[in-house]
Image (tube, rainbow, N blue to C red):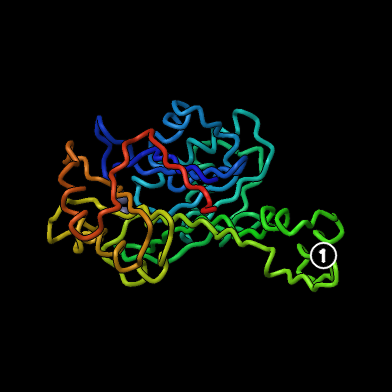
Amino acid sequence: MIRVYFVGTGGGAPSPYRSLPSYLIRREGFYALFDCGEGTQRNLMEYRLGIMSIKLIGITHMHGDHVLGLPGLIQTMGLLDRKEPLYIMGPKAIKDFIERTSELTGFRAPFEIRFIDSYEDENIRIYKFPTCHTIESYGYIFEEKERKGLDVEKLRRDGINDWQILRELKAGKEVRFNGKTLKPEDYIIVKPAIRVAYTGDTSYCEKVIDSVKGVNLLLHDSTFLDEKDAREWGHSNAIDAATVAKQAEVKRLALIHISSRYRDTSQFVRLASRIFDKVFVPEDLSYYILDREP
Ligand SMILES: [Zn+2]
Ligand SMILES: [Zn+2]
């Protein structure tokens, strides 16, 4: 099960209604934070999401609204005496940014910061994809890998409960049982991967469509409602975001990075749903749960 916390859903400047961009994706004890606008650590505390549990931070690009909360968050982790390494992904300048702010503010993290390009363990994969913004910029995919398990119901129906047979089948081997050959493919079910994509800032972008094909949840830039000049600013409007969601055949769309000029977002949903109807505008400090299909 994956939980996506919408920590800050605004963009550009904070407003009384929306904080600057930050999204936390949690799978069991693994916490990954994507972007860290100013105010993020305060919001995480309000959510009671332990900042020490964050293992990885992915930064989409170097614009201040996405990154100015990061030195403060790292400093707090240090003050709380973190020892575990912290993985950081992002554009080239991210390493310099962290090292320079640390130097100029006279703070040295008492833990190791590892700059990486992608992350993988036995359950999770996290990787970047390019987006169309005004500076070097990436989106992220957080994937809970597909999982194979035995079809317990079918095994019970066929009267198979010998653990050695179960082990062989699980290992993908054929087994003789009561004069029959049991084929592993008849007893193994594949639980599909769950994927969440976060675009950061982007205008309507073919590269994004290619990268987010079929994801379970897409968090897409929708800075503006229907302004035609969104693209010139390297951003999207609600129609662009819905068009990407439709073309990429995603399962659900969250419109994010809402400009501080809008308080009421009902028009965003109304407009986007003419193109793609599984759409919502998350509020700050709300979350969304994704579970594997049976
Ligand atoms: Zn932004
Ligand atoms: Zn930006």
The residue depicted at 68 percent of the width and 58 percent of the height is 154
| Location of residue 61 in the rendering, given as x and y in whole percent from the top left corner | 40, 56
Residue carrying label 1:
168
Q: Quadrant of ligand 2?
A: bottom left
Can residue 116 be seen from the camera position used here? no
Q: Nearer the viewer, residue 39 or 267?
A: 267
Q: Nearer the viewer, residue 254 or 150?
A: 150
Q: Nearer the viewer, residue 111 or 217?
A: 217
Q: From the viewer's perspective, is residue 15 above or below residue 196?
A: above
The residue depicted at 84 percent of the width and 67 percent of the height is 177
Q: From the viewer's perspective, is residue 181 above or below residue 285?
A: below
State left or right for residue 183 relative to residue 164. Answer: left
- Quadrant in the rendering for residue 124: bottom right
Callout 1 secondary element: helix
| Location of residue 226 in the rendering, given as x and y in whole percent from the top left corner | 14, 55
Q: From the viewer's perspective, is residue 205 above or below residue 217?
A: below
The residue depicted at 38 percent of the width and 33 percent of the height is 285
Q: From the viewer's perspective, is residue 76 above or below residue 60?
A: above
State left or right for residue 184 relative to residue 48. Answer: right
Q: Amino acid at mark 1?
A: Glu
Q: Residues within 10 Å of mark 1 (few under 14, many from 20)?
A: few
Q: Nearer the viewer, residue 71 or 29?
A: 29
Can residue 174 be seen from the camera position used here? yes
| Location of residue 111 in the rendering, given as x and y in whole percent from the top left corner | 66, 41
- Quadrant in the rendering for residue 163: bottom right
Is the residue marked 1 within 8 Å of ligand 1, measured from its CB? no
Q: Quadrant of the N terminus?
A: top right
State left or right for residue 99 relative to residue 140. Answer: right
| Location of residue 140 in the rendering, given as x and y in whole percent from the top left corner | 46, 58
